[in-house]
Amino acid sequence: MHQPIYKDGIDEEYKAPWTFLHGIKDYYDMPYHLSKFKKLKAVFNLTPSLIVQLKEYAEGGSKCLFLKTLRKEVKSLTRKEKLFLLKFFFKSPVKTMISPLKDYFKLYLQKERLSEEEFIDRTTNQDFLNLEVLFLLSWCGNYLRENSKLVKGLIEKGNGFSEEEKLKLIKELTEFIGKILPLYKEMQEEGKIEISTTPFYHPILPLLLNVESAKETTPWIKLPGLHVSFKEDAEEQLRKALALYREEFGRECLGIWPAEGGISEECIELFGSSGVKWSASDEEVLLNSLESKGREAIYKSYEFKGVKLFFRDRELSDLIGFTYHDLKEEEAVNDFIDRLKNKKGKVVAVILDGENCWEFYNKNGWPFRELLYKRLEEEEWIETVLPSELEAEEKLSRIKAGSWINGNFLVWIGSKEKNRAWELLGRAKSKVEEKKEKEGYERAKEKILTAEGSDWFWWLDEYRQSEESQLFESLFRSFLIGALKEVEEEPDYELLTPLIKVERKDFPPNNYIKPKIDGEITNYYEWLNAGRVRLSGISTMERSKRVIKELLYGYDETGNLYLLIRGDFEKLRGKEISFKLVFLNSVQKEVEPKEFKVKKVAEIKVPAEEVKEFFGKKAKLLIKLFVNGKLLEEAPLMSFAVLELDRNFLEEWIV
């Protein structure tokens, strides 16, 4: 059970509500469901970064931007605030979370046909309020749906919700989060579960202890240029985690699930010297350490330097995490039991995310787990045990450093973006350590520890470009900037520059168009075959600050070019608006269009003779927006829009 700290390192505000949402859906439901089965035992790993967030949400979540915005009356929401909320409202699996709520599914279908801005324009205050409540209800877990009169009543009502009902629901859900940690503590006291933990902010501990450990499985890796040691931070991450555990659960922590199953010899030695009795990792780490390809080796318990070790069965764990949601419950459970029966050994460790897979299952995985738990209880040859109840069967002479992903650390280090992040982290840490006399030093140090979390580096990748990656990247930089500000150091330019490229979801025209230039989308087909280019920044919040958002473009058979600019033109009502268009390929030309109209959108026609030298190839375009004769903004930001003007649709067949 893990969530990274979503709190911005500068303004201390939570920028995403995922801890809250999984709190009402998964974190209570999982142990509660297990408690219904007398014979079953399980380990739940609660990361400290999750625990501190759950405690803050239980107090009302006042620092959460999402909840703060959601509590406002819909009629008082700004466009910017609606766009921010909308960013989360449809990020759930449609089949399992959206479509079961009839009116939620209707709103989803409406949203699919429109841009974000159009959806907001066409949605009434009541519909938006319905969407807010239905979104919360869709995230309510099975326990809430069965035991909360309010949740049950609102689901039955379906729509027409009031602001009072919304606030009452938010209040009940935040109070419910306060029941999560006490349930775990109670079940551990009963011996039903064992709670393990992770170094505080979920860092890849072997890399903090010694970045060279990455070379043990990938000797060719290019490592960042670091001039600072993170070893003391690694020790601090573990010390803080064990201290929080004692405070929260009233006993010593016996087991550690290292972040992402990442271990090394130095890491396990640190665990042992800190009083930790057991830990775990992935099967590939064991097989690399034994230099063996025989998977039967993973079905034992081991010991290294006094610490018991268990190794994850990747097949069974990943089947639950990624595959079984596509099967009927009975088929999936039968498959699991049949595979388990064929394992050649005594101990099988099934280890997976506690929260992230269930939204893809029917009813949040309850029917699947119900059948699985029954079978695990019924089969006499199966016993579920806690790691502390087992003795080590064999000793390991060595451990080859690695994680649960391919037995190495490449997800967190080695690429251009990831290495740059490590270097920025190292530089910020050095500057903070030079200012120990400053009043904000301890707060700065805490933000450096937060920036060492694995999640930020996971998302820093040219192949993972999405709104999530942009959020994680910006949070990472915010911790470093925040740390420097705490010790009165100004961040340098590099920290103000994103580490990953701006994502663009562009596509070319697929047929000729000939729209009416009237400042409105006259009918559905008018711009249907147009190409699309995103023109603004990388996040919804950033887009909401600018007038120009998106460009649709196309051309007719004679070469006239048509542009439709979506944006917040409402704020410019009553002002004189004009445009200049800068085209560029082998030549550059600035065009001041004469035929255009601005109402809900801006529609522009550029005659063929003005742009004939740019047809038959790709052309770059920069749009300049003038208000009352003065330049207001240019779009896109920091680049050109690329228009594909090279297709002859008369020679292409479209069916």
Image (spheres, rainbow, N blue to C red):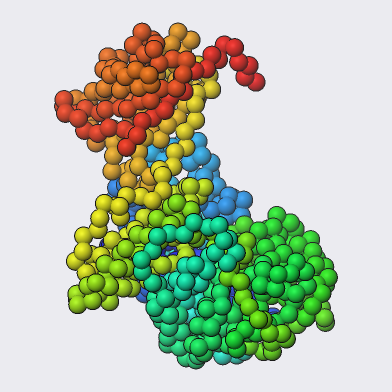
- Of residue 584 and residue 22, the one placed in the foreground of this image is 584
* Quarter assignment of residue 599: top left
Q: Is residue 570 left or right of residue 91?
A: left
* Quarter assignment of residue 166: bottom left
Quadrant into which the C terminus falls = top right
Which residue in the rendered view is the most extreme toward the front?
A: 220
Please indicate, yes or no, whether residue 566 appears anywhere in the rendered image: no
Q: Is residue 409 left or right of residue 326?
A: left
Residue at horizontal 61 percent and vertical 55 percent from the top:
96
Vertical relation: 313 (above or below) 245: above
Residue at horizontal 73 percent and vertical 86 percent from the top:
393
Please indicate, yes or no, whether residue 326 appears anywhere in the rendered image: yes
- Of residue 383 and residue 483, the one placed in the foreground of this image is 483
Residue at horizontal 65 percent and vertical 84 percent from the top:
303
Q: Is residue 207 left or right of residue 171?
A: right
Number of numbered markers: 0
Vertical relation: 82 (above or below) 332: above
Q: Is residue 110 left or right of residue 13?
A: right
Vertical relation: 310 (above or below) 97: below
Vertical relation: 457 (above or below) 236: above
Residue 119, given in percent of the width and then of the height, sits at 42, 40
- Of residue 48 and residue 484, the one placed in the foreground of this image is 484
Residue at horizontal 57 percent and vertical 55 percent from the top:
97
Residue 56, given in percent of the width and then of the height, sits at 37, 73
- Of residue 88 and residue 344, the one placed in the foreground of this image is 344
Residue 37, given in percent of the width and then of the height, sits at 69, 80
